[in-house]
Image (cartoon, rainbow, N blue to C red):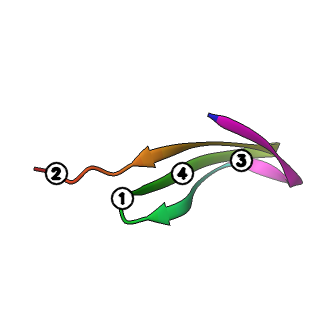
Amino acid sequence: MKLDTLPFEVDQLTWSFLDMKNDGGRIALMWGKTLASTPFKAVAAR
């Protein structure tokens, strides 16, 4: 998980999806001045 410092403060814990593409992206948590994110891949059901 990658940690970054936000240039603003988030009062409530927030989940977001970033850099979305057809097969994945990054899921992010923001709280206070911290953004924690990790990449994920979507796998088609068989």
Task: Point out the residue furthest to the top here.
Answer: 1
Separation of marks 2 and 1 at Cα, in angstroms: 12 Å
Q: Which numbered tag is attached to residue 23?
A: 1
- Residue situated in front as seen by the camera: 20 or 16: 20
Packing grade of label 1 (10 A; few <14, some 14-19, many >=20) is few
- The reply to whether callout 4 and callout 1 are in contact (CB within 8 Å) is no
- The residue that disc 3 covers is 30
Badge 1 element: loop
Identify the mark nearer the N-term, 3 or 2: 3
Q: For residue 45, which numbered disc appears in the image?
A: 2
> Which of the two labelled residues, at mark 2 and mark 4, occupies the earlier sequence position?
4
Which mark is nearer the camera, 2 or 1? 1
Q: What stretch is highlighted in magenta?
A: 2-13
- The amino acid type of the residue labelled 4 equals Arg
Q: Which residue is drawn at 81% across and 50% down?
A: 11
Which type of secondary structure does the marked residue at label 3 adopt?
Answer: strand
For discs 3 and 4, the disc positioned in front in the rendered view: 4
Mark 4 residue element: strand
* Residue 19 versus residue 33 in the image, above or below: below
Using a 10 Å C-alpha cutoff, classify the residue at mark 3 as few (fewer than 14 neighbours), some (14 to 19) or many (20 or more).
many
